[in-house]
Amino acid sequence: MAVALVTTPRPGVKHFIGIDFDFGALKNSGRRYWGFIAVLGTFIVLGGAAWLLYFTHGGSVMAMRDGSPWGLWFTNYMYYVGLAAGGLVVYASVHLFGAEQFRPLSRIAVLLAGVFVMMALLGIITDMERPWRAVWMLLTPNPTSPFVYTGSAAGIYMVICFVDLWILITGFGGEKLARRMTLIALPVAIYLHTTTAFVLSMNKSRELWHTAMMVPIFLSSAIASGIALLLISAYVLTKVTDIRFKPSMFRSLSTLLSTVMIIDLFLITVDVLSVFWPTSASSGHTLRFAEFLSGRYAWAFLPVLILGFGAFALLSRRKTRHLPAVQITASVMYVVAVLFKRYSLMAMGFSYTTLGQKLPIYFPSAAEVFLALGILAFGMLILTVGVKVLPMEVPEYEDAEVTSL
Amino acid sequence: MSQKEEHVPSCDATDCVEPGPTLSRRRFLEGIGVAAGLVAAGAVPAVLTAGPATAADSGSAESGNVLADVIEHDGAVNYPGKPVYYADEAGDQKWAMVIDVKACVGCRKCVYACIKENNIGRNAGFGYIQVLEMEPGKIELESARSDYKEGGQPDKWYLPVQCMHCEKPTCVYGCPVKATWREPDGIVVIDYEKCIACRNCIVTCPYSARHFNWYEPEVPKNEVNPKVPLEEKAGVVEKCTFCVQRTRNGMTTACVEACPVGARTFGDLNDPESAVSKLISTRRAFRLKEELGSEPVIWYVG
């Protein structure tokens, strides 16, 4: 039935690069859909205005200063890159490890991943005062700069995601190519999260960042928040579209989520321990980290632990963990926890200058917030339209096998 | 350290112990010292033997030994091969600075002279130099203050910090587009026309020496220094250049010139007779955050 949905010609369906774009669905969609699009459009316009303000007034409209040279855009970069990981994990588990229960999710997962990485890249571009100079990244890249690697990794990952989506939708190359693409995409994903962690950890100037632990923490946070986001998205899809998923899929997803979650929480706990353990504590570290446990940044860091462990507790209660409400709550808690974690990570580098001078706490300015919301709205717009126009529903597996053979 | 050990054959034990009118007691002891260092083959003895020798007969070929690592290291990092457009080409010097923290009174004259010389926006909110008011008894940055009231208190000491022009500059390594580099004479410079404003160099610098122009720099018309760029600096990173526009033309830096107590000395490490070489090899000198290994070329003496 699902296959017929893709191939039967319907009014408004345009066939292009092997994909049936169902523009007719846009015409038939209701007021609420267009209302949502209008809200997104408003935020995109506001974000554009904020970017324009940045061009005309320079960085003065931002809250960032020399003490915290990176701000909301960097928090979001780490966050979006991380959220994009979930897509790949699901995609890889289907095509590499044969986790068939996730197959219905694979298209939406890859679309999410691509859009989130695109948002991360937009964050970098809009932060530059002269974005056209970014061409130097290609002409004279500096091999010792972690920035070059994370930037290129994000670009490559985005392309891979959209190519993957095309392969999944068109069925081009069949199961074999989908599997081979995973073999490329998975290392690139690990490379992306590793090099993003490098941007922080490869700095001997910033005590709290300067730990190799940053890399596994980035991987675990990314995968955990990515899976949580996917679970939320799948739930939202069942509410706003005709796409339906089996309860068993949600159950597998939340089991995977709780496993990665506890690894993530374990790693951060170990890292906190090593900062304060008497035989390892150094005054600069403890002074800076104390800000995050009991000082000015406690509001940002304590939720990471509270929400994180809370979400894990919710998912580990045998009696209730199969309930969608519990799974969604835990997922939302973890996605929020990781956002706080990204902000804390950013602030950990910038709570004091490298000369030990205490800095005022960083809050993004209105221009920064609107710019970030504009980028987010742009991403959401692509998702909203994409889900409507692209054939997101994965045909039943039996059918898929037949077509791929 | 291998460089130190290479020096040993030029004055090996037999050569120095050979009896003759030229052999002084000091040379003999030094020879023994070097031999001991060779036997131990460790880093510490080698440094110990080099130390007394330089203190004893500064001016001899060995006087530079303590700085051998710095001098012999090829200064250029990511050098694109073209000179900074507003200064002369690098000479064969290896520039360095020595700041006498015993003399510094924290008057910030250097800060203001630097702002004027280098066209730093009066609205920028930064200067290339930050003077830290230090608590007595420790070199602890976390208890230092950069926003102290001027005048200098007798129970505090003052530590001026600026770009250290490191031998292994983390900022240069961190720049994704090679818009900043270390010139052959050791000065770390920025190409304002190329900087993409990612501010990664600010993040990587352990000395908070780099500053971003969040505002368009404003300088009163009659105070603009025509030898230094101004408009180009809007929206990019800038920092101390060791006054490249002055020092390559035989002048000294603006901060050295402005210091009322003569706490600052600028000069050429390649020249063993220069004031900086002598200060570093004869006084108790230290560098800030030396443990990070970025080999800064600003020494502090106390």
Image (cartoon, rainbow, N blue to C red):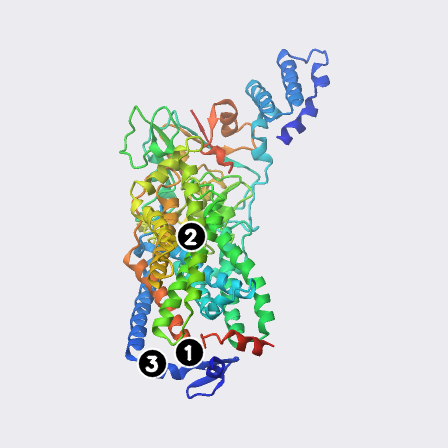
Tell which circle, 1 or 2, labels the residue nearer the N-terminal end.
Answer: 2
x and y percentages locating residue A69 in the rendered image: 38, 50
Query: From the viewer's perspective, is residue B212 above or below residue A168?
Result: above
Identify the chain of the residue marked 2, using the numbered disc in the image.
A
Foreground residue among A138 and A184: A184
- Whichever of callouts 3 and 1 sits on the residue coming sooner in the sequence is 3
User: Is residue A168 something one can see in this rendering?
Assistant: yes
The residue at the far left in this view is: B149
Kindly state the secondary structure of the residue where label 2 is placed: helix
Residue type pointed to by label 1: Val
Q: Let me know if residue B179 appears in the view.
A: no
* Whether label 3 touches label 2, CB < 8 Å: no
Q: Are marks 1 and 2 in contact (CB under 8 Å)?
A: no
Q: Is residue B273 left or right of residue B259?
A: right
Q: At which x and y percent is residue A136?
A: 51, 59
Structural crowding at the residue carrying mark 2, measured as other residues with C-alpha within 10 Å and reported as few (<14), some (14–19) or many (≥20):
many
Residue drawn where x is 30% and y is 73% of the image: A36
Q: Residues within 10 Å of mark 1 (few under 14, many from 20)?
A: some
Residue that mark 3 sits on? A29
Q: Residue furthest front?
A: A319
First in sequence, mark 3 or 2: give its number.
3
Q: Which secondary structure, mark 3?
A: loop
Pointer 1 and pointer 2 on the same chain:
yes
* Residue in front for this viewpoint, B57 or A162: A162
Q: Residues within 10 Å of mark 3 (few under 14, many from 20)?
A: few
In the picture, the disc for residue A261 is 2
- Give the amino acid type for the residue marked by disc 2 in the picture: Met
Residue displayed at 29% across by 43% down: A296
Estimate the spatial distance between the alpha carbons at disc 3 and disc 2, rounded to whole Å: 38 Å
Do the dots labelled 3 and 2 sit on one chain?
A: yes
